[in-house]
Image (cartoon, grey):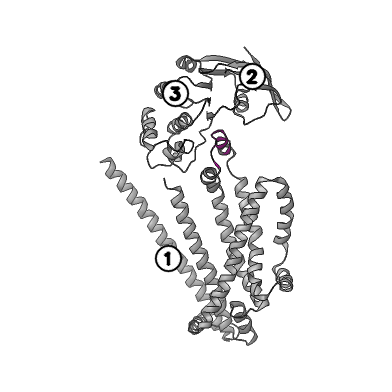
Amino acid sequence: MKDKDMKDNAISADNIIINSKIKSFWIKLLVLCFWIFVWSLLSRIINQELFLPSPKSVLLAVLTLSKVAGFWISIANSFIRIISGFVLGLIIGAMIATLSYKSKIIYELISPLMKVIKATPVASFIILALVWISSVNLSVLVAFLMVLPISFSNILHGLKSTDEKLLEMAKVFHIGRLKRIKAIYYPAVTPFIISAISIGLGFSFKSGIAAEVIGRPANSIGLNLYEAKLYFMIKELFAWTVVVILLSVLFERLVMRILRCYGHIQSRV
Amino acid sequence: MDIKVNSICKSFNGKQVLSNVDMTISKGVITCIMGASGVGKTTLLYILMGLLKPDCGEIKGLHGKRISAVFQEDRLIEHWDAIKNITLVCKKDMTKEKVIRHLTDIGLTDYEGKPVRALSGGMRRRVAIIRALLSEYDLLFMDEPFKGLDEELKKQVISYVMKNTKGKTIIIITHDKEEVDMLQAELITMKSNLVF
């Protein structure tokens, strides 16, 4: 009887979670419809596709573009470059955060550099970087430089927030380094890594595409955006912008889902 | 070898917590340290565990000793279950069956598959005690280990501790004289930085 009650309670809790997820999905969909409606309304009022194309014509432009192989090649090239910069920034940021956590001297050395990178305008980086490297690798470097200080400060913050009492416990019981990382550091740092990924991905796409617009490497989203602007192809300009937004949002969702699944596996006992 | 504490002092931010503390802790028996709150019992325990360095004095008989501890707080990995928390500090040859046997011995049931944060205070305390007892140690430090347990449970846990620590050197901080009697322990009373 008791088992049956517990099972019923678990089922009703699951139902509540599913219902709230469905509710949240419909709310998000309604909000999206509302803004598309506002966009459509503004486009009708202005009534000039050159200034503000309608959502319908932008969608059609995306569909037309997607029929050409160059569209997918540009997306793949830009995506790979930006994600490479993002991943590099995340990993190297994590490494120097760990070193800074371990050594006060390294922290004092690295911290001002991170502050400078954080405060420097993206445009300055792009122009300076163009002097140093080829336009093909520009978006990699810019995405890397955007993510590096975010990854560094978030992960360092996470490491510093690790429970000192648990670390004392680990010291007394001589718990090995790997076990310490898994049991104590990983749960403490994970929310900060998730936050770094979420913020960093948005920055990477924005700055990476900006770098491509200025550097104009062949077969890239940035070059397509630049050309669309140059020839007043406003529908295409909007279409490419929509593609960048979708790319950034969908990839962020994918990463978050993977992290959540991994976190779930880790916390499962 | 007995543990000899010679003229230990410790202060925090200019406030003297321990001053010239001397004591001898006998090998292979349970020693209880009693004293009023703020007298420096936990500080002394931290120094003995190597988590704090004394400002002056020395401790003999600790070198090379493996230590284990039950802290004032449980200090468990909250999102892990009881078995995983215990095996974290054990050698690789510790089997799940052995851990379950100890959990049963101490009267713990209904813990499987639950993270320890979902367990009651008394259950968590017992997990912390088993964790300390199943690790490899020569010296066991326990800071108010039976706090928060009801009388019946306290008796059961004390009997479990006595059964599983025979011949080991155990240092327990307590406020309860009854616990000292139940543990048949040697007693050291700390009083205003003086030891009697």
In the rendered image, which residue does mark 1 sit on?
A26
Q: Earlier in the sequence, mark 3 or mark 2?
A: 2
Amino acid under disc 2: Val
C-alpha span from label 1 to label 3: 57 Å
Query: Looking at the image, is mark 1 or mark 3 nearer the viewer?
Result: 3
Amino acid under disc 1: Trp
Q: Secondary structure at mark 3?
A: helix
Q: Position of residue A259 (x, y in %)?
A: 49, 57
Q: Secondary structure at mark 2?
A: strand
Q: Is residue A91 magenta?
A: no
In the rendered image, which residue does mark 2 sit on?
B5
In the rendered image, which residue does mark 3 sit on?
B161
Q: Where are the magenta residues, as a range?
A: A167-176
Q: Is residue A82 above or below residue B144?
A: below
Q: Position of residue B122 (x, y in %)?
A: 44, 30
Chain for disc number 3: B
Q: Are marks 1 and 3 on the same chain?
A: no
C-alpha span from label 3 to label 2: 25 Å
Q: Are marks 2 and 1 on the same chain?
A: no
Query: Looking at the image, is mark 2 or mark 1 nearer the viewer?
Result: 2
Q: Position of residue B86 (x, y in %)?
A: 45, 36
Q: Quadrant of residue A52?
A: bottom right
Residue A177 appearing in the image? yes
Q: Secondary structure at mark 1?
A: helix
Amino acid under disc 3: Val
Q: Is residue B107 above or below residue A239?
A: above
